[in-house]
Amino acid sequence: MMKRHFDVESDGFYGAYWKCKTGSDCAMIAMIGDDPEDYLARTSVKWLHKLGVNVMTMSPGKKDYGHHNYPLERIEKAINWLKAHGDQKIGIVGASTTGTLALTAASYFEDITLTIGLTPSDFVWQGFMQGKKDGCKEWPIEGESLFSYKGEPLPYMPFCYKHPDYWHVIEKETKRTGDMINSRKLFDDSEKVHPIQEDEMIKIEKINGALLLIGAEDDVLWDTAKYIRRMKQRIKEHPHTCRLESVIYEHGTHFVFSESMLKTMLPVGSGLFVKLAFQAARKHPKECRRARLDIDQRVRNAVAKWKRVDRSFESG
C-alpha cells in the first residue's frame, strides 16, 4: 500500500495517509493501533479501503504508548490537510481510548460528519502513560488529561488510585478474572469517589452528521454499556444535529471489532485470539461471534450511507 507519512515536527501531527486505489473523495481518520503504520493500523486501512474510502491513520506519537494531553489540534490539522487534498467528506473511527478521542474530536470539529466510537466513554479521564516504571506497565500522570486544546488540558475525571496502586489494582483484577487485562474496578471506583462533572462530559450533541456507538455489557476495561446509555439520554436532553445509532451487546467483550476486520487482522485463529484475551469470550464464543457479525454490517451500512448522503443535508 502506498502511503504518505506525517510527523509532528514538520506537519503538526503524527500519522500516515493511505489513498484508496479505486479513487474516493471520502476519508476516514482511523486511530486503531499504537502507531499509524503498525500491523493493527495497516489492517484497519485494508478493511476501510474495501469500503471505498481513503484512510488517515493517527496515533499519539512515535514510541508514545500512552494518552496524555494529546493536542486536539493534531486532528484539526489532519482534517485541514485532507480537505486541501481532495477529501470532501471526513469521518473518524476509534476503539477503546481512541474511541473516546474520536467522540471528543468530533464534538470540536464540525467537518467530521461520521463518527464511530467502539467501546468509548462519555467523559474525559486522567492521562496515563504505558511502559515500565517501578515494575508497573501503566501509570496515571498527575495534572494531565487525556486530551488538550489550545494549550490547556481538557477537564477530566481523576483516578482515585495513584501510582503504583493504579497498576496494582489492574494487575490484581486481571489475575483474579483471567482476562488479558481488566481495569473496570479502576474506573468504577474512580467514578464513585469523583462523580463525573458536566465539564468533563463529552458534548456529543455538538457532533455533526452520523454517530455510531458500539459496546458490550461484558466489557472488563470499563463500563462502556453504562456510558453509551448515558450518551443516549444526553442526546434526548440536549438540542443536537447528529443522528445517533447505538448498540450494546450482552456479549462482545472490549474487542467489538467487525468479524471481517478481525479476520483480516488474524486470517487464522481470530476467534481463538479473543477467547484467550477475555474470559467472557471463552464462556460465550457464539454470542461474541454473532455480535461481531452484526457489527460488521452496522459499520458497513454506516459508511455506505455516509458516502451517499449529500453534504448540504448533513450540514442542515
Image: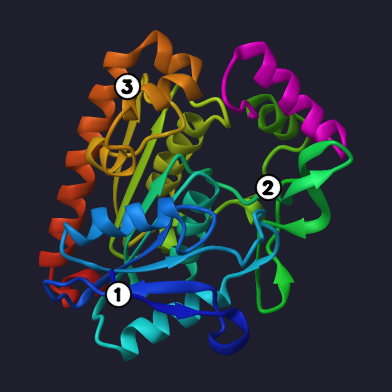
Q: Is residue 164 above or below residue 300?
A: above
Q: Are marks 2 and 3 in contact (CB under 8 Å)?
A: no
Residue 215: image quadrant is top left
Q: Circle 2 is placed at which residue position?
A: 197
Q: Is residue 39 visible?
A: yes
Instruction: Choose mark 1 or mark 3, whichever is in front.
Output: 1
Task: Locate residue 8, reporting x and y percent.
Answer: 60, 80
Tell which circle, 1 or 2, labels the residue nearer the N-terminal end: 1
Residue 188: image quadrant is top right
Amino acid at the residue labelled 2: Gln
Tell which circle, 2 or 3, labels the residue nearer the N-terminal end: 2
Residues in magenta? 160-183
Tell me the distance, in whole angstroms, between the alpha carbons under discs 2 and 3.
Answer: 33 Å
Residue lying at the far front of the rendered structure: 268
Residue lying at the far top of the rendered structure: 283
Tell which circle, 1 or 3, labels the residue nearer the N-terminal end: 1
Crowding at dot 2, Cα within 10 Å, few <14 / some 14-19 / many 20+, comes out as few
Crowding at dot 1, Cα within 10 Å, few <14 / some 14-19 / many 20+, comes out as few
Look at 63% across and 85% down and name the residue there. 9
Q: Circle 3 is placed at which residue position?
A: 288
In reply to whether residue 177 is colored magenta, the answer given is yes
Task: Locate residue 46, reporting x and y percent.
Answer: 26, 57
Q: Circle 1 is placed at which residue position?
A: 2
Tell me the distance, in whole angstroms, between the alpha carbons under discs 1 and 3.
Answer: 34 Å
Look at 45% across and 39% down and name the residue there. 119
